[in-house]
Image (tube, helix red, strand yellow):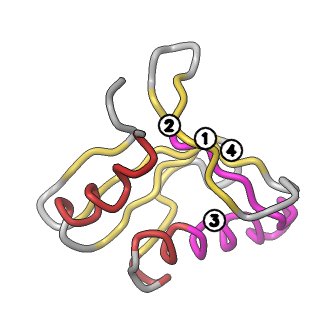
Amino acid sequence: MSPPWKLFADHLRLTVRLTPNGGRDAFDGIDTDSEGETYLGARVTAVPEKGKANKALIALVSKSVGVAKSSVSVISGETARKKILRIEGDPEDLARKLEVFLE
């Protein structure tokens, strides 16, 4: 299974499938959608209103990879379940921190 991220010169792009009102803030591991694309499953307790779930997702990701919240942004899927996040930083280092979800 390929990882749900792509490395670029100064950032990493992570594909996430978000479940708001998920009962807890956590990652559910890596899965594949019907088109064969991989994504990291995530759930947050926040509701999908006025960007609250997106903010909770950004907080969860930033804490998990050890970067500031301002280094994480939603670049695609603002109102959809499937989102692409841009994480600023050393892409190799960020990928190593995310590889724990491949196991």
Q: CA distance from mark 3 to mark 1?
A: 12 Å
The magenta stretch is 40-60
Per the image, the residue denoted by label 4 is: 80
Could you say whether the residue bearing mark 1 is in a helix, strand or loop?
strand
Could you say whether the residue bearing mark 2 is in a helix, strand or loop?
strand
Task: Give the residue at x 72% y 53%.
Answer: 43
Residue at the outermost front position: 103
Q: Residue 86 placed where, x, y %?
A: 38, 61
> What is the crowding at mark 3: few (fewer than 14 residues within 10 Å), some, or many (at least 20)?
many
Is residue 52 rendered to the left or right of residue 72? right
Per the image, the residue denoted by label 2 is: 39
Q: Which mark is residue 82?
A: 1
Which image quarter holds the C terminus?
A: top left
The answer to the question of whether label 1 and label 4 lie on touching residues, with beta carbons closer than 8 A, is yes
Q: Residue 60 placed where, x, y %?
A: 59, 70
Q: CA distance from mark 2 to mark 1?
A: 8 Å
The answer to the question of whether label 2 and label 3 lie on touching residues, with beta carbons closer than 8 A, is no
What amino acid type should be assigned to the residue bearing mark 3? Leu
Could you say whether the residue bearing mark 4 is in a helix, strand or loop?
loop
Could you say whether the residue bearing mark 3 is in a helix, strand or loop?
helix
> What is the crowding at mark 4: few (fewer than 14 residues within 10 Å), some, or many (at least 20)?
few
What amino acid type should be assigned to the residue bearing mark 4? Ala
Q: How many callouts does the rendering have?
A: 4
Of callouts 3 and 1, the N-terminal one: 3
Q: CA distance from mark 4 to mark 3?
A: 13 Å
Residue 55 covered by magenta stretch: yes
The answer to the question of whether label 4 and label 3 lie on touching residues, with beta carbons closer than 8 A, is no
The answer to the question of whether label 2 and label 1 lie on touching residues, with beta carbons closer than 8 A, is yes
Q: CA distance from mark 2 to mark 4?
A: 14 Å
